[in-house]
Image: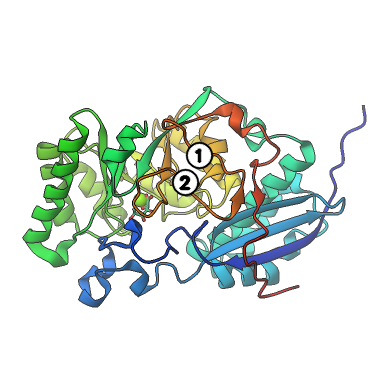
Amino acid sequence: MPVVNLPKIKHVRAFTVRGGGADYHDQGAGHWIDDHIATPMARYPEYRQSRQSFGINVLGTLVVELEADDGTIGFAVTTGGEPAAFIVEKHLSRFLVGRSPADYEKIWDQMYFSTQYYGRKGLVVNAISGVDLALWDLLGKLRQEPVYHMLGGAVRDELQFYATGARPDIAKELGFIGGKLPLHHGPAEGIEGLHKNIADLAEMRSRCGDDFWLMLDCWMSLDIDYATRLAHRAWDECGLKWIEEALSPDDYWGYAQLKKNAPKGLLVTTGEHEATRWGFRMLMDMECCDIIQPDVGWCGGVTELMKIGAYADSKGVMMVPHGSSVYSYHFVITRHNSPFAEFLMMHPGPTEVVPMFAPQLLGEPVPVRGKIRASELDKPGFGVELNRDIALHRPYPN
Ligand SMILES: C[C@H](O)[C@H](O)[C@@H](O)[C@@H](O)C(=O)O
Ligand SMILES: [Mg+2]
């Protein structure tokens, strides 16, 4: 039996898309995800009501499309928009054309170290992640295998999810294992804001009962003193399960202190705005958190998530990737130290389950009673197709 020589990459295309999807903060008016949520910008009153007012959705979605010389197409979506499209078409494409998608290690290494002088985290690693995810999608389509088979196969029959959104009470009715609320008030709103945060959480605890997981997502908005006071009150009065991303992603020292300050039993989590094995090694070696939450579309892609996950596993740290639809499901189903996944409730209420990256992915699976069976992932690559009815714009055709 001759060794299979896969087709080579012939075309690299980067598109941008507006309106939901991978840049899930890019929603219309009245959506829960833009309703007075605490952020570092809330110290400026004019930017307190809406995260879109300071530009949380300024980038939009990046679509990376890789076409092999036999016509097979792999693609992926992430956050990045036009600047990321520029990086893909004008810089990263030179490491892709003429190469086999099976060379994802060497390609990742060249993409990262060729952009290290201006990248390392944020937008550039988002772009690298988008390319890496498209490589794995193409590889799966060429091999006719789902990505999770190539990552070692399922270690359980189904994925279970907690839900992120403004209505954990509805998430409980829908069968999710927990509900993560956005924090609404930060230090700039003083003790009154802290009392309101606790009142919001207590109201949800009264609706959900004592055993349903309730978490708070603080989206980088707090300081160590406020986070410590919030953690103790939320634990004592509301049985909070974890406090997420309380501080700036750069404040490793603050997280290490918060983990010491937090009440025993309350979990400290972070990582969605961290990138690469080196950034997550810093979080774990400095004992910043109990659970790391990389976003596979922002941290470096599957090739990097494997390295991050292995280091976490070696240290007994749980890794629950930030909500990134199928791109994290294919990883989570294969790892014991990723026992559950996040589902971002993108319905405006949210009162119902809708596909996380709608309307961009055709065939995107959604949790039913809070679960997705592994067999639902049994399609080549990530098992989804790009919705070509949406307005794709290619700003930098090569
Ligand atoms: C709900 C949070 O404010 C963010 O919008 C959310 O996307 C992210 O932090 C998450 O963990 O899902
Ligand atoms: Mg979060």
Query: Going by the image, does 365 lie left or right of 171?
Result: right
Q: Nearer the viewer, residue 384 or 11?
A: 384
Q: Position of residue 78 (x, y in %)?
A: 55, 57
Seen as rendered, the residue at the extreme bottom is: 46
Q: Within 10 Å of the Cα at label 2, are there few (<14), some (14-19), or many (20+) other Cα atoms?
A: some
Indicate whether 215 appears above or below 224. above
Indicate the amino acid at tag 2: Val
Q: Nearer the viewer, residue 345 or 141?
A: 345
Residue 366, disc: 1
Indicate the amino acid at tag 1: Val
Kindly identify the residue that appears in the image at 54 percent across and 23 percent down. 155
Q: Nearer the viewer, residue 110 or 96?
A: 96
Indicate whether 359 appears above or below 242. below
Give SS at disc 1: loop
Marks 2 and 1 in Cβ contact (< 8 Å): yes
Q: Position of residue 39 (x, y in %)?
A: 28, 63
Q: Position of residue 49 (x, y in %)?
A: 25, 68
- Let me know if residue 261 appears in the view: no
Q: Position of residue 159 (x, y in %)?
A: 48, 30
Comes first in the chain, label 2 or label 1? 2
- Quadrant position of the N terminus in the picture: top right
**Residue receiving disc 2:** 354
Q: Within 10 Å of the Cα at label 1, are there few (<14), some (14-19), or many (20+) other Cα atoms?
A: some
Name the colouring of the figure. Answer: rainbow
Query: Going by the image, does 311 lie left or right of 243?
Result: right
